Image (cartoon, grey):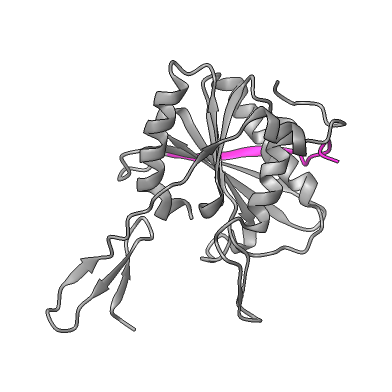
Amino acid sequence: MFNSYYIFHKVGVVKPLSNKYLKEIITYNFKSESNYYLVEVEHYELDIYIIKFYLKKDKRNSDKYNILTNENKCSRIINTCIKVMLEIYSKDKLASFGFVGANTIRRDIGFEEPKEQTKRFTVYKRVMYALLGVQTFTHYYDASNSTYLMLNNKSESVDQKFENAKKMFEEIFPILS
Amino acid sequence: MGDKLTLANNALTTGSKTDGGVKPVNKKFKSHFVKVTIEEINSIRPSVYKYLLP
């Protein structure tokens, strides 16, 4: 199920000036059968990379992470994002990763999924369990905020890194969610 | 309308009409991370999948 993916390309790196934790945003793109997607990888302090993706046509839409594409290519799209993670890991062996499973919003019918334990979070969590083992990463999740964090076990002290990462998450969460 | 501003980090601020000031909404985010155990993973993980990273 999670073995096929779309060919992706790195399209740019932006270095933000005004965020004390965010070092750079690396953007990749890929094309599915019917849509163009952008994958944004936010590279934070502590070698933490936060993966986000959305339809390119929704780039300026404030709900871009919350929209359902109805493309039914979920596994292939998620697997493409995992391949992006693996590419980053191949270049940075200390890389840790995280993501937020955004809640679905459908303004046309007035539907807004609660932010706790979202459907996306549940799916992504299962994929992480299935494909990325505990030898490489220590896995953490926060179901109440639908957030997942995988800390690299090569880090000097994973427990200390976790405490630092938690503090950072608490500060940057308004940007992530 | 007109009394909400969005900061660069998408945090909302509200402007008071009485004092004309803009006050940040200091709703502190609290995380509730839990460490995933190998038992939890094994209870859910389909054994047919191969790890991409061990």
Does A77 sit above or below residue A34? above
> Residue A22 location, x and y as percent?
39, 39
Which image quarter: residue B36?
A: top right
**Does A7 appear in magenta?**
yes
**Does A34 appear in magenta?**
no
* The one of A18 and A131 positioned closer to us in this rendering: A131
User: Where does the magenta region start and end?
Assistant: A1-14
* The one of A6 and B28 positioned closer to us in this rendering: B28
Horizontal placement of B43 versus A97: left or right?
Answer: right
Q: Quadrant of the N terminus of chain A?
A: top right
* The one of A72 and A158 positioned closer to us in this rendering: A158
Residue at image point 61% right, 67% down: A113
Horizontal placement of A73 versus A64: left or right?
Answer: right
Tally the numbered discs. Answer: 0
> Residue A19 location, x and y as percent?
33, 44
> Residue A98 location, x and y as percent?
54, 39
Does B3 sit above or below residue A32? below
Residue at image point 84% right, 31% down: B47
Q: Is residue A12 visible?
A: no
Does B49 sit above or below residue A61? above
Does A23 sit above or below residue A73? above
Q: Is residue A14 visible?
A: yes
Residue at image point 66% right, 43% down: A125
> Residue A17 location, x and y as percent?
32, 42
Residue at image point 39% right, 25% down: A160
